[in-house]
Amino acid sequence: MIYTITFNPSLDDVIFVEDFEIGKTNRSYSEKMFPGGKGFNVSTILHRLGLETTALGFVAGFTGKEIERQLKERGFACDLIDLEEGFSRINIKMKGKQETEINGSGPVIPKEKTAQLMAKIKEMKKDDWLVLAGSIPSSLSNDTYAQMMALVEAKGIRVVVDATGELLLKTLVWHPFLIKPNRDELEEIFGYSIPDAKTLISAARKLQAMGAENVLVSLGSKGAMLVSQDGKIYQCPAANGILKNSVGSGDSMVAGFIAGYMKSGCYDEALRLGSACGGATAFSEDLAQKELIDQVYETLQAEEIRYA
């Protein structure tokens, strides 16, 4: 089973406008609502790729009920903990000549509710996967992901971490199977510019020395690079298409990487499918469907490259 965790989910209100003017009444020409959350996005793509997944996390209030309803319509299992106070946040995502976002803060998660989630994690079994994706509420400590990894460290569970800053760095001692920083996040971690592939690979190898097994670096229009556990470096170009949606592309890449590795055991195939999923979502109004993923997959090829 592949478990994903979303601490602070949202109901994403996506509003399409011709042009946005500050201080004036703006009217949309189209509007859609989706359940938001990096873990939910990963589970959605995994399910569309035919893999079994369960979404864990917290929901609250009327927005939480709608999030859970929409997730169940997608067809995968949800085991969400209901919070008695507050409501799951609403994120406004306005798409026009530029993309503008206003993200809510979300409810406080009491200690007893966090303990319930930790108990679910303790029940995970050998060969399960655990995906820790996204930020956590300010009511929780920045070693929360590390605490979860400590619970499963002896069980042979592969853990994927898609987080930033201290939240990511504190997990490295527990040797996550995969982490997925982008170039900006690497620069923030190490405090220097990363202008070229050689510097990027050096930074990724530093994260491996700190404990990460595989480092997948998303590079936007320049594709993605993987510094793998076997000491090799793989690269995949970005897919060609019209950008419609930047939300969820990185989460889709994580899901595709997991699916590709589970099906083949090969890092180049994992990178290829991950890149295909990320690109397909970028070319879709919502998360990608399997048909488009397959089409994009056929246009890509990941290959090993050599750097000193």
Image (spheres, helix red, strand yellow):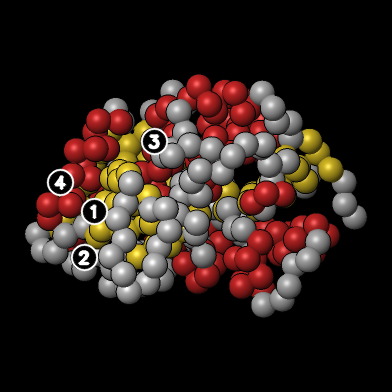
Callout 3, which amino acid? Thr
Callout 2, which amino acid? Pro
Q: Residue at 58% x, 53% y: name it.
A: 180
- Answer with the quarter of the image where residue 206 lies: bottom right
| Closest to the observer, 128 or 102 | 102
124 horizontally vs 60: left or right: right
Graded by Cα atoms within 10 Å as few (under 14), some (14 to 19) or many (20 or more), the crowding at tag 3 reads many
Q: Nearer the viewer, mark 2 or mark 1?
A: 2
Q: Is residue 306 above or below residue 195?
A: above
Q: CA distance from mark 3 to mark 2?
A: 24 Å
N-term-proximal mark, 1 vs 4: 1
Q: Position of residue 75 (x, y in %)?
A: 29, 28
Q: CA distance from mark 2 to mark 1?
A: 9 Å
For label 2, the residue is 107
For label 4, the residue is 65
Q: Is residue 132 above or below residue 295?
A: below
Callout 4, which amino acid? Lys
Determine which of the numbered discs, if any, sits on residue 44 in the image.
Answer: 3
- Tag 3's secondary structure? helix
| Closest to the observer, 213 or 221 | 221
Q: CA distance from mark 4 to mark 3?
A: 18 Å
Q: Residue at 27% x, 37% y: name it.
A: 71
Determine which of the numbered discs, if any, sits on residue 58 in the image.
Answer: 1
